[in-house]
Amino acid sequence: MNSLRNRLIAASCLVLVVFLGLVGGSVDQAYEDAAHRALRDRLQGQIYALLSVAEFRDSGDIGMPEILPEVRFSTPWSGLYAQIADAAGMTVWRSFATPDWGLSFKSGLGPSQFEFQRLETPQGASLLGLSFGLVWQDGSGKLKSHIFSVAEDLEVVESQVEDFRQRLWVWLGLAFFGLLVTLGLVLRWGLSPLRAVAKDLKAIQSGSQGQLRGKYPRELEGLTSSLNSLIVHQQQQLERHRNRLSDLAHSLKTPLSVLGSMLDGKGSSEIRNVQVSEQITQMSSAIDYQLQRAATAGRLGPIHVIQVAPVVDRIMGAMQKVYADKSIKINIQIDSGLVFEGDEGDLLELFGNIIENACKWCRSKISISAGKVSGSDLSSISFCVEDDGPGIAEELVDRVQNRGVRGDERAEGQGIGLAIVSDVIDLYEGSLDIGRSDLGGARISVEI
């Protein structure tokens, strides 16, 4: 299921089914319980109604009037039945509507004791019965015990419950489809900004526009901003590669012209060999120079979370081998768990050039520190390298960041180390500061 809209609809359907199922089941059970509770209350009311019209005679008998409070007691097969039994369980009175089924009502109940029970008729019908124990005194002062019992057919109640259940699930089903349609419309409206992003991306792909220009919701601003940054990044990389190819072609043009002029065979072979060697060396240097420029950051690979400390340790391990004759004393202070979110090649270019610069110019000491930038909402880190070398003159600070400029023209190198650092910093919208270290040499601070 590759459609985000379909995924949301499927998940919403599942949630709706579970929710409406729970609601429907709860309402159904509540209605059924309420119906049975109402039936119990009615039966209790019928008991009280019979007690109110009963005649308690001095002889110890109980008489009932012909006209009872509830007309269904006098209507055959009305579904409402009543009887009175004595202490021995013998029936002493039965309502006109009550057939001689010999229903097993409760017996042996104490005074004022109610007892509900389910009963079955010989025809298989279900009844809910209620029995009430009564003790009274006859004319001679003897205590007489009787049990008043009533029962009502459950078919009516169960029919009402079933009818309510059917209507309930029909309405819940209609509610489900109504909510589903509404949800589909809401999702279509809610996902319209994503369709707008896709439309703008197609326009960028076709070349009709350069960036995402739509007015997007706040939740998509981070995404669209990142996409615009990625597009600008790609454009800058493409432009950089074009520049590198142009620079390389320009650098090779003159040596190739010189080599072409040697084809006429003038001059001794020894002189030509020296000249060819010089031009080959010049071409090799030009190629190396342009390759280093092309390799500077600008990668479009995925962003990684990289532990800073292991990268610095790896760089220092290599530097200590290269400058083993200096016996450099190194002080490293890196915050525990500090990470860099970006391309590992960029991090190696950045830290490697700064650390190599310090190792090259220091006398015997280097201090390296790194930590998260305090108060920043972004994932920004700071990196500082100090040495005890001659340092960089203030008037050269801006110049040494340009390609091909060295702090000491007599020293070996191409003078592009700090320029590469500047390129990487620009890609990550960071900052570079070059100053005087407390150790006496240069202090190069970076924030990205």
Image: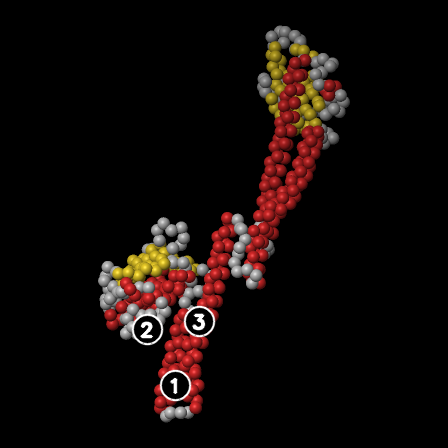
Residue for point 51% across, 54% down: 224
Quadrant position of residue 115? top right
Q: Is residue 321 above or below residue 130?
A: below
* Distance (Cα) linking label 1 and label 2: 23 Å
Q: Is residue 9 visible?
A: no
Q: Nearer the viewer, residue 283 or 265?
A: 265
> How is colour applied across the structure in the image?
secondary structure
Query: Which residue is the site of mark 2?
Result: 413
Quadrant position of the N terminus in the picture: bottom right
Image point 58% across, 44% down: which residue? 15
Residue 276 disc label: 1
| Amino acid type of the residue tagged 1 in the rendering | Val
Q: Secondary structure at mark 2?
A: loop
* Label whose residue precedes the other's in the sequence (3 or 1): 3
Q: Earlier in the sequence, mark 2 or mark 3?
A: 3
For mark 2, does the 10 Å Cα neighbourhood hold few (<14), some (14 to 19), or many (20 or more) residues?
few
Quarter the C terminus occupies = bottom left
Distance from disc 3 to disc 1, alpha carbons, whole Å, reads 25 Å
Whole-percent x and y of residue 28? Answer: 63, 35
Residue 285 vs 311, above or below: the answer is: below
Query: Which quadrant of the figure has residue 61?
Result: top right
Which residue sits at x=50%, y=57%?
Answer: 227
What residue is rendered at 67% in x and 9% in y? Answer: 57
Name the amino acid, label 2: Gly
